Image: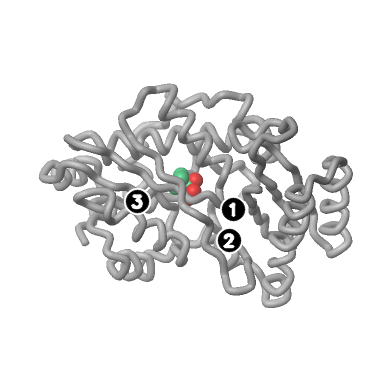
Amino acid sequence: MFIAHSIDDLRGHLGRFDHPAFVPTMGNLHDGHLALVRQAKPLGDVTVASIFVNRLQFLPHEDFDSYPRTWDADCAKLEDAGCDVLFAPREPDLYPTPQTCKVQPDPALADILEGQFRPGFFTGVCTVVMKLFTCVFSEAKGQRTAVFGKKDYQQLMMIRHMVAQFALPISIVGAETARADDGLALSSRNGFLSADERAEAVQLSRILQALAANVRQGAADIPALEAEAMQKLHARGWAPDYVTVRRQTDLQVPAAGEPRVVLGAAKLGNTRLIDNLEV
Ligand code: PAF
């Protein structure tokens, strides 16, 4: 696996390939990330992953400093998954001067759900992804593909929207959420959970599943079911931010018959988890 820390090294190396398939990450890799790499593999003539913990998408009180950095283990896992190129810029490589020019995502999508509880989060995500795209795809001659997990459903939608609005010649592939045996969605933040919290954590997906089953069966009073799901989490010791049923196309409140997705975000102890299920 070729490792590039600078944009010039990355571009110099990628010049010899035609159609990269790219998986951006913040490291601390788990099987969900590796599934994205494996999914990317047949989609290009070179598989590129990035590891960059992007300060721009963390609020001042969030876990930027404590976000796990597991370089040696990450490199070994990427090699194992068949990654060809790892782009791992240090902060001054990607942001040599403060990144004052930013992507301003559509507030109708960026300011709801995750964006309501993490203001500025999607500006940070879109800005770094745009920059990573220009680094990884600038030398490409054919198809350009990037793979994102559906676990971050709103993020995937935001990236698709950005790519469409800026007419970027990049295909965005959404990959199914990888789950532990008990159903917990794999996340880098699961590592923050104590043993007791880890045992409890699966309840988020169970409660979303119960809500999704009710929606599927045609339940009429969705707001009451959302409130009940929030209450169940509260009662179990969680601090939920939202549990909500939205339409799949734009995450607004759905009309009857539209494809829906159930989304939830809640804190368990100090760890904030998110999950979702398409209905
Ligand atoms: O999903 C993530 O890990 C990050 O938000 C991403 C897409 C790598 C941007 O920093």
Q: Indicate which disc residue 63 carries.
A: 1
Q: Indicate which disc residue 73 carries.
A: none
Label 1 environment density (alpha carbons within 10 Å; few <14, some 14–19, many ≥20) = some
**Left or right relative to 274: residue 28:** left
**Percent of width and height locating residue 28:** 46, 62
**Percent of width and height locating residue 36:** 40, 56
Residue plotted at (68% across, 31% down):
252
**Percent of width and height locating residue 140:** 19, 37
The amino acid pointed to by label 3 is: Ser
- Within 8 Å of ligand 1, the CB of disc 3? yes
Badge 2 marks a residue whose secondary structure is helix
The amino acid pointed to by label 2 is: Arg
Tell me whether the residue at label 1 lies in contact with that at label 2, contact meaning CB atoms closer than 8 angstroms. Answer: yes
**Left or right relative to 269: residue 28:** left
The amino acid pointed to by label 1 is: Asp
Give the distance between the C-alpha atoms of the residues marked 1 and 2, in whole angstroms.
Answer: 10 Å
Q: Which residue is mark 3?
A: 50
Residue sticking out furthest to the bottom:
195
